Amino acid sequence: MSEYCGQLGTVLDRRSPGYALVTARQQAHQRMLEAKASDDAKTKFLANMSHELRTPVNGVLGMLELVRHTEPGPRQQHYLETARRSAEMLLEIINGILDISKIESGKIELEQSPFDLRDLVEDVVQTFADAIYAKGLELASFIPVRLPTALIGDPARLRQILTNLIGNAVKFTDRGEVGVRVEAVEAEGPSVVLAFDVSDTGIGIPPEKQRRIFDAFTQADSSTTRRYGGTGLGLSIAKQLCEMMGGTIGLTSEPGRGSTFRFTARFGRQSEAEAGRGQGSGAEGGSRRSVRNFFQSRAVLSPGVSS
């Protein structure tokens, strides 16, 4: 383009309108190249820094785990646990930056492996049992019994999206409940499109903030960051992963009443032989799972635990 414009410019009179147009196009093309080079340099820098930071943080976590097994006193145990949580939060931020840089540079490839959707959703829900118990909330998942659950796709990335959305719902909800619902949008043929709803009764998001909520490093407002923490990377990563999986993501929200995030994704369907080998014990069970029974059992078995 620039070579063509240069050759054309030698033919045109420098005082002619045509020469000014060619010059403007040359300048615009040059600015585009510079902007692309700047974006590439930023992505490479973030990826390199993330890799460099992960090594010492993992070293810190390893040493903390070793010290924890030296039978420290109660006060030292508290200090170690605080340090461990802080290091894990830092590692989570680093991993988020690394994911963003990989996605922007096109270096993330989705796996295509068999998994059971029901088992995956229930596993993710159970990881939030302690947080739900501590806040006195209810967290339930609803998966229709007839929904195809023997799927082929990237279970790790689906787990990442669900973990982010459920984690946000739990974080921003002080009373009420958090729900996860899955339904089929397209269920015919060798693939299936599923819709996932993650709803809460939390603080909600103002309408004017909803348009930019999926932008990287964006949260509803600065007070949210101060009170709840976070970098604003999770939803941006979730959006790009959804698009890579052939789906979309959006939300409906009302301040003070809660939010519902809905995303879709396309998965392959396992053959009957594969589904039979990998079928979990809950495949024919009830469609609704709640961690309320877990809370009740915990309260009976551990009466000394307070919420």
Image (cartoon, helix red, strand yellow):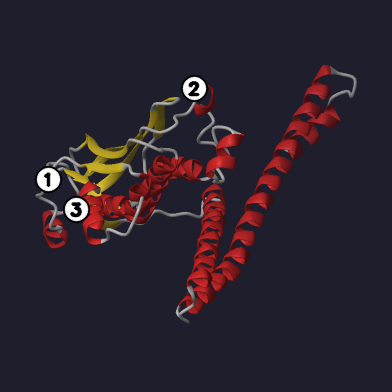
Which kind of residue does numbered mark 3 sit on? Gln
**Disc 3 secondary structure class:** loop
Q: Extreme front residue here?
A: 304
Foreground: 42 or 141?
141
Q: Quadrant of residue 188?
A: top left
1 or 3: tag closer to the N-terminus: 3
Task: Point out the frontmost of discs 2 and 3.
Answer: 2
User: Can residue 270 be seen at all in this image of the molecule?
Assistant: yes
Mark 3, other Cα within 10 Å: few <14 / some 14–19 / many ≥20: many
2 or 3: tag closer to the N-terminus: 2
**Eyeballing the image, is 64 above or below 197?**
below
Alpha-carbon span between mark 2 and mark 3: 41 Å
How far across and down, in percent of the image, does residue 64 sit? 52, 73
Which kind of residue does numbered mark 2 sit on? Pro
**Eyeballing the image, is 67 above or below 83?**
below
> In this figure, which residue is indicated by the disc labeled 1?
286
Marks 2 and 3 in Cβ contact (< 8 Å): no
**Disc 1 secondary structure class:** loop
How far across and down, in percent of the image, does residue 230 sit? 54, 46
Q: Extreme left residue here?
A: 284
User: Can residue 216 be seen at all in this image of the molecule?
Assistant: no
Marks 1 and 3 in Cβ contact (< 8 Å): no
Alpha-carbon span between mark 1 and mark 3: 22 Å
How far across and down, in percent of the image, does residue 138 sit? 29, 42
> In this figure, which residue is indicated by the disc labeled 3?
270
Res. 207 mark: 2
